[in-house]
Image: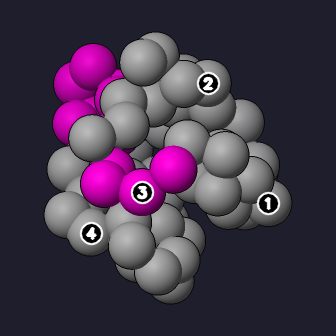
Amino acid sequence: MTLLSVPDMSCGHCKASVEAALALLPGMAPIEVDLTTRQVKVAGPAAAALAALDAIGFPAKALD
């Protein structure tokens, strides 16, 4: 699992956008989004997840 910090994710709509963007990428499932800690766990590689989140306006960083 890859753990990401997404500091700009602050509401339910943000969470849904992050989940939707990551779900489009092959190999990311399962995707766990924790709005309280603003962290996301994905099964896939950090580079692909970071690029997808940056493309939708949610810059993130890998914590692993």
Question: What crowding class fits label 1: few (fewer than 14 Cα within 10 Å), some (14-19), or many (20 or more)?
Answer: few
Give the SS element for disc 3.
loop
Q: What residue type is labelled 1?
A: Ala
Question: What crowding class fits label 2: few (fewer than 14 Cα within 10 Å), some (14-19), or many (20 or more)?
Answer: some
N-terminal of the pair, mark 1 or mark 4, is 4
**Quadrant housing residue 29:** bottom left
Circle 3 is placed at which residue position?
44
Q: Where is residue 51 in the image (x, y as percent from the top left)?
A: 74, 53
Where residue 36 is drawn, which disc sits there?
none
The front one of 9 and 53 is 53
Is there a contact, CB below 8 Å, between mark 1 and mark 2? no
Is residue 27 something that shows in the picture? yes
Circle 1 is placed at which residue position?
55
Q: Distance between the residues labelled 3 and 1?
A: 17 Å
Q: What stretch is highlighted in magenta?
A: 34-45
Q: Where is residue 25 in the image (x, y as percent from the top left)?
A: 52, 77
N-terminal of the pair, mark 4 or mark 2, is 4
Q: How far apart are marks 1 and 4 (CA)?
A: 19 Å
Give the SS element for disc 2.
strand
